[in-house]
Image (cartoon, rainbow, N blue to C red):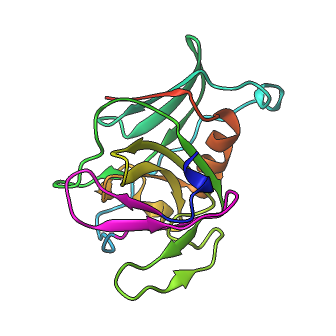
Amino acid sequence: MFFNRSLLTIAVLSGSLLLPIVGIARNAIAEEVSPEMTAPAVQQEAVAIPSETNQVLATRLVLNLKERRVYAYQDDKVLASYPVAIGKKGWETPKGNFTVMQMVENPKWKNPWNGRISAPGPNSPLGERWIGFWTNGKNHIGFHGTPGEHVMGQAVSHGCVRMRNRDVKALYELVKTGIPVIVQ
């Protein structure tokens, strides 16, 4: 598993920005950097998951890039869907069929320019959860929380899929490593 290594590097598909993850036993340091965007926020609400379905696990995730929304399915039933922010022009979120390969609670963020590490938690640039689904063996892309929840519905990231902290925490409870992630 990736989170057992002492150093992982995350980067976007089409660029040279490296996003280091350092982790031991589900703690990680990772980074995705993007400038503050001034575009108006898109208000979208998550589909609530009834409490009696919280124990049900998704069998696949579908990320619809045009809708800027991720759907958690159990077979043919939508368990939940959430608004997301995706990769911006030149840093597009990769399309294809992938697999959840890494899950980290409370990832820490390391600034690639000055090396500073921010504390884990809701104000970390990676928010409260990381769900990695793409790698080239060296670099990674995944779903993660963000304190900049106003960017939902926009193309602003360096390839990763940003989610509101409450939404990525709920999604984290629905998935496990090994389930398919379809990005279309």
Q: Please tell me which residue lies in front, 128 or 36.
A: 128
**Viewport quadrant of the C terminus:** top left
Give the residues in magenta.
Answer: 8-33
- Residue 6, visible in the rendered structure: yes
- Residue 130, visible in the rendered structure: no
Q: How many marks?
A: 0
At 59% from the left and 73% from the top, the residue drawn is: 123
Give the x, y percent position of residue 58.
Answer: 63, 25
At 39% from the left and 89% from the top, the residue drawn is: 114
**Is residue 22 located in the magenta-colored stretch of the structure?**
yes
Extreme-right residue of the structure:
52
**Left or right side of 58 for 15:** left
**Left or right side of 96 for 8:** right
Extreme-left residue of the structure:
90
Principal SS element in the magenta part? Answer: loop
**Viewport quadrant of the N terminus:** top right
Give the x, y percent position of residue 15.
Answer: 20, 60
At 70% from the left and 32% from the top, the residue drawn is: 49
Give the x, y percent position of residue 152.
Answer: 43, 53
**Is residue 9 located in the magenta-colored stretch of the structure?**
yes
Give the x, y percent position of residue 79.
Answer: 63, 24
